[in-house]
């Protein structure tokens, strides 16, 4: 007999003998008529599979795998399928507060759900990661010869990186091309009314996103960004709809939630709320192990919290936390709850509510310097923020600036943390946006553009990229939009 476990839904609806009600498709875009079956109760690294999550609403069980409301129903042939939530086929009687679960009785027929036979075995779990080695002593930083100067040319970010011998291996933006010759798609939107998709490209090679087709396509309906295309030759696209750490599925952002302007031209940024995120576990070209890499991002202020993890960068190549040194990503937020009490006590009162902090998420922690707390790495909260992270053996660097004016500020430039196993690094070359490596998905944030490279790029290249960003002319749509978009959440 299929029963509801004695905890609050949303949850898997499971039986004592190991069955769960499951949409017979792992695809996020499952539609009405998709078969619902009784299958083995499966888990990813953190929670039940996304296609086994349901929300009790009245006398229905609504699927949390799909955004358009669809519920579990009984068809005329006695099979189960996703059905419109207003249909008589989706009405059941169940008591979710029963101590030992409850039967689920179909109101139309009076019969209860049962699971027959033995559930099939789940795939074997992935092998555990290799044991982490202890830190290897690093040479004195003063003994390292300075890197030779590399000529820097003006241009778009990935053109600057390429000219500096640190070429892009991933480049993502919803607002513009990041190469002067790039003319491909920037992102793909899907509308909920008919689940049709549309690719959004720039107005010209190397140009700004063409928002007009999106406005027409999404008029009078909801659209989400499902794919953020990689503009480099490596094809490291970012896709939504992976199993989440705290939510069943990391959904794509609302495609129309954040209109902004670049030089007076309307484009759309990406506003992340909880339960949203993108990932690619099968990348090409990203740094692995202790290889050097550099990255930058333009992120918004005024929409952040103290939960994990609003990241962009190098992550695990499978969902899960694989240990210290297995990530290297830009983090932007106020997640300091995991700091030891003595470091949290060092946070100045003037920092409270002053904005998010730029940190390096290098797994098992986000670091503003050699330790979690760095007095020189104060919060920044511009409307548009240029954030930079680069790392090599024994060292990493953090820089930040106002994307609308001025130069970059060095937030940290020095050795990696020594109290944990961060030397050598063990980067795995996965790619995330909006979540942590384990798909922790409760952070808030705003993303406009970003890129990742091989190699440890020069300060001159970083300043050239900042100059290019400033020259664009990012601006909010209205004078009062800063207040309208403000969403700062602190959890006790």
Image (cartoon, rainbow, N blue to C red):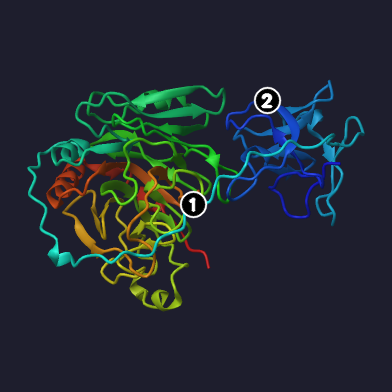
Dividing the picture into quarters, in which one does residue 150 lie?
Answer: top left
Q: Mark 2 falls on what kind of element? A: loop
Residue named by callout 2: 32
**Left/right of residue 70 with respect to residue 192 in the rendered view:** right
Q: Determine the residue positioned at 70% across, 42% down.
A: 54
**Left/right of residue 294 with respect to residue 360 in the rendered view:** left
State which quarter of the image contains the N terminus. top right
Residue 268, position as x, y percentages in the image:
36, 36
Residue 477 visible from this viewpoint: no
Q: Give the number of the mark in front: 1 or 2.
A: 1
Between the residue at mark 1 and the residue at mark 2, the CA separation in whole angstroms equals: 40 Å
Please state which of residues 364 and 436 is positioned toward the viewer in this rendering. 364
Please state which of residues 27 and 255 is positioned toward the viewer in this rendering. 27
The mark tally for this picture is 2
Disc number for residue 47: none
Residue named by callout 1: 129
Sequence-first disc among 1 and 2: 2
Residue 11, position as x, y percentages in the image:
69, 47
Q: Are marks 1 and 2 in contact (CB under 8 Å)?
A: no
Task: Say few, some or many: other residues with alpha carbon within 10 Å of mark 2 (under 14 / 14 to 19 / 20 or more).
Answer: some
Q: Determine the residue positioned at 43% across, 23% down.
A: 198
Residue 394, position as x, y percentages in the image:
26, 60
18 is higher (above) or lower (below) than 398: above
Dividing the picture into quarters, in which one does residue 397 lie?
Answer: bottom left
Q: Determine the residue positioned at 45% across, 39% down.
A: 281
417 is higher (above) or lower (below) than 252: below
Residue 469, position as x, y percentages in the image:
21, 43
Task: Say few, some or many: other residues with alpha carbon within 10 Å of mark 1 (under 14 / 14 to 19 / 20 or more).
Answer: few
Q: Mark 1 falls on what kind of element? A: loop
């Amino acid at each position: 007999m299929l029963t509801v476990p004695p905890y609050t839904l949303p949850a898997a609806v499971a039986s004592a003998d190991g069955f769960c009600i499951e949409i017979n498709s792992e695809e996020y875009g499952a539609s009405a008529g998709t078969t619902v079956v009784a299958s083995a109760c499966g888990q990813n690294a953190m929670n039940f599979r996304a296609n086994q999550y349901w929300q009790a609403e009245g006398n229905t069980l609504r699927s949390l795998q799909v955004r358009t409301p669809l519920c579990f129903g009984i068809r005329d042939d006695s099979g189960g399928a996703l059905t419109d939530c207003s249909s008589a086929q989706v009405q059941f009687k169940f008591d979710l507060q029963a101590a030992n679960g409850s039967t689920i009785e179909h109101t139309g027929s009076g019969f209860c759900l049962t699971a027959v036979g033995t559930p099939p075995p789940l795939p074997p779990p992935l092998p555990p990661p290799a044991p982490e080695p202890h830190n290897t002593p690093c040479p004195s930083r003063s003994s390292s010869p300075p890197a030779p100067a590399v000529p820097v040319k003006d241009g778009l970010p990935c053109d600057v990186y390429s000219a500096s011998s640190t070429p892009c291996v991933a480049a993502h933006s919803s607002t513009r091309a990041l190469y002067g010759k790039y003319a491909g798609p920037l992102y793909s939107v899907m509308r909920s009314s008919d689940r049709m998709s549309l690719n959004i490209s720039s107005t010209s090679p190397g140009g700004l996103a063409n928002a007009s087709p999106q406005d027409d396509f999404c008029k009078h309906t909801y659209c989400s960004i499902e794919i953020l295309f990689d503009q480099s030759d490596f094809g490291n696209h970012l896709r939504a709809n992976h199993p989440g750490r705290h939510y069943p599925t990391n959904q794509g952002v609302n495609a129309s939630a954040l209109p902004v302007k670049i030089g007076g031209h309307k484009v759309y940024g990406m506003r992340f709320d909880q339960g949203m995120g993108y990932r690619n576990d099968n990348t090409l070209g990203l740094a692995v192990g202790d290889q050097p890499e550099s990255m930058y991002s333009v992120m918004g202020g005024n929409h952040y919290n103290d939960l994990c993890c609003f990241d962009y960068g190098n992550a695990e190549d499978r969902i899960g936390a694989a240990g210290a040194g297995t990530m290297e990503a830009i983090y932007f937020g106020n997640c300091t709850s995991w700091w030891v009490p003595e470091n949290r006590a060092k946070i100045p009162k003037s920092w409270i509510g002053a904005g998010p902090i730029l940190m390096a998420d290098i797994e098992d922690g986000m670091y503003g310097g050699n330790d979690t707390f760095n007095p020189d790495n104060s919060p920044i909260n511009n409307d548009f923020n240029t954030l930079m992270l680069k790392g090599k053996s024994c060292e990493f660097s953090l820089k930040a600036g106002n994307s609308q004016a001025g130069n970059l500020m060095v937030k940290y430039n020095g050795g990696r943390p020594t109290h944990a196993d961060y030397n050598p690094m063990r980067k795995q070359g996965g790619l995330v946006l909006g979540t942590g490596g384990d798909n922790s998905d409760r952070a808030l944030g705003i993303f406009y553009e970003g890129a990742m490279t091989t190699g440890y790029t020069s300060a001159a290249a970083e300043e050239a990229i900042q100059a290019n960003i400033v020259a664009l002319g990012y601006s909010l749509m209205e004078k009062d939009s800063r207040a309208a978009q403000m969403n700062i959440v602190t959890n006790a």
